[in-house]
Image: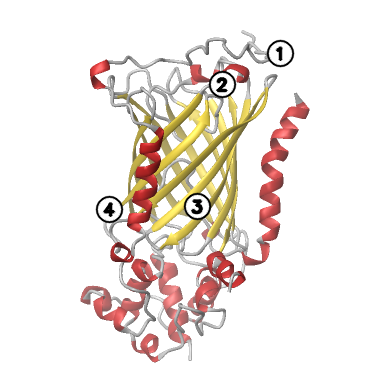
Amino acid sequence: MCRRYLLAWLVFIFPSLFLAFWTGILLQASEGPYFITYDHHMEEPGSLEVGFAPIVGIPRLSNNFVGGWMEVEYGVKGWWTTEFYLTGQSTSNQGTVFTGFRWEHRFRPLMGEQWINPVLYMEFENVNGADKSIKEVVGHDSELDLMDPIAVTSLERKREFETKLILSSNYRGWNVSENFIAVKNITNEPWEFGYALGISRPLALAASSRECRFCRENFIAGLEFYGGLGDWHSFGLRDTSHYLAPVLAWQLGSGTTLRVSPTLGLTSISIPFMVRFSVSHEVSGFGRQVKQWFK
Amino acid sequence: MAIPQVRSSSFPAWDAPVPLRGREPQRSPTQEYPVSHSTVLVMFVSTALLLSQPGLAGRKKEKASGAEFLRVPESAQALVNPYDGKPDAIRAGRKLFQRHCASCHGKDAKGRDDAPSLRSPDIREAAPGALMWFMKNGDLKNGMPAWSKLPDQQLWQMVSFLKSLE
């Protein structure tokens, strides 16, 4: 069991650390606190962010697991951000599998800052049924989905098209974001719906005049609330799972952001407890450097 | 109650039926609209390509010339920098500039590639409120990101720093 866990961590952590060290000199701006909820802040044009986000789940009815994703996010334009994910998981006494990939785009249709800023989100994902990254909760997703062993679920292929309407506002240092999610498996399954809400604020609004890692301005605290809303045939809260997750982000001056989020399941079919972690690094001017290589 | 430990010793036969996981949604044949893989991919890629066209992406990238500040609303231009003239704010602004802006505008704020120099008469003469509004809203079509993720206080500190540049 230990060896399998070790393998899972190595599969994710080694590439992340490699990228982190490779890009270490160039690290710049940092990221927000949310794991599930999206706000309207896009990646800066030409910037590349690499990240690693494991999730440790402790379900009641099945084995403990470590899931997660590696992400590469790129700011194509000021109003267009694209992101690519590789996902995998390791379940106690079952094994470790690579589960698939996701590719998403976010578009900001209004150029200026508004009271409520809309962002359109489109994603295509190709994962197998063993995926436990729990990047969103939709439809009737529940703890029961985790019960079947990897050997069985990894044979199930899920190709889904996902859309989100992201609404986000900033007011006096607070960010409030609402996401409305619709997912369509491209085979014969109905649309599934979900939501994610987030609120966050830096611990200090003004920056201190000295360089410091532990200044309050470097920490952002918040709360996420997300869950499923049923599907096309049974829309609503009945038999859906919901989660409440405090989040804390620590933005190191070097451009690295560390995040943690203990997550509590709120309904009887939710996974009772999970902990999410993430480390991400932003490489500013990546696009410009790549252009120079090819000049 | 002990937690059941599920063990998988081997993969099932290739033709073994895959059990349904969790709750299987109730289906109504009349309400289903199956979409092929290729359709979704074509929609996905074509939308991305369409949106990346210059016509929709906006004007051709142009160097900042001070004209950006003309479209700043008057109400924003009239805003007063609460940190005006405070040395601590200038130092904090310098730190923030190095963290968020230097990769494009250069560590010395003299500009790089498409990002203009910030040691210019346009910046010196612009109203502090206009600078703050411009940083907050950005110019997304021309590559200037919106820094609304930073609190207003930090944007004002950066304005103090920009105003201190010779």
Disc 1 marks which residue? B9
Residue at 40%, 15% in the rendered image: B24
Q: Position of residue A225 (x, y in %)?
A: 41, 36
Check if mark 1 and mark 3 are on a common chain: no
Where the C terminus of chain A falls, by quadrant? bottom right
Q: Give the residue type at disc 1.
A: Ser
Q: Which mark is residue A116?
A: 4
Where the N terminus of chain A falls, by quadrant? top right
Q: Give the residue type at disc 2.
A: Leu
Whole-number angstrom distance, CA of label 4 to CA of label 3: 21 Å
* Image vertical order of residue A10 relative to residue A146, above or below: below
Query: In this rendering, which labeled residue sits more in front, label 4 or label 3?
Result: 4
Query: In this rendering, which labeled residue sits more in front, label 4 or label 2?
Result: 2
Q: Considering the numbered disc 3 on the image, is that residue within a helix, a strand or a loop?
A: strand
Query: In this rendering, which labeled residue sits more in front, label 2 or label 1?
Result: 2
Whole-number angstrom distance, CA of label 2 to CA of label 3: 40 Å
Q: Position of residue A18 (x, y in %)?
A: 71, 53
Would residue A212 appear left or right of B82 to someone viewing this image?
A: right
Task: Specify the color scheme.
Answer: secondary structure
Residue at 57%, 10% in the rendered image: B16
Is the Cβ of the residue at disc 2 closer than 8 Å to that at disc 1?
A: no
Q: Considering the numbered disc 1 on the image, is that residue within a helix, a strand or a loop?
A: loop
Would residue A1 appear left or right of A285 to someone viewing this image?
A: right
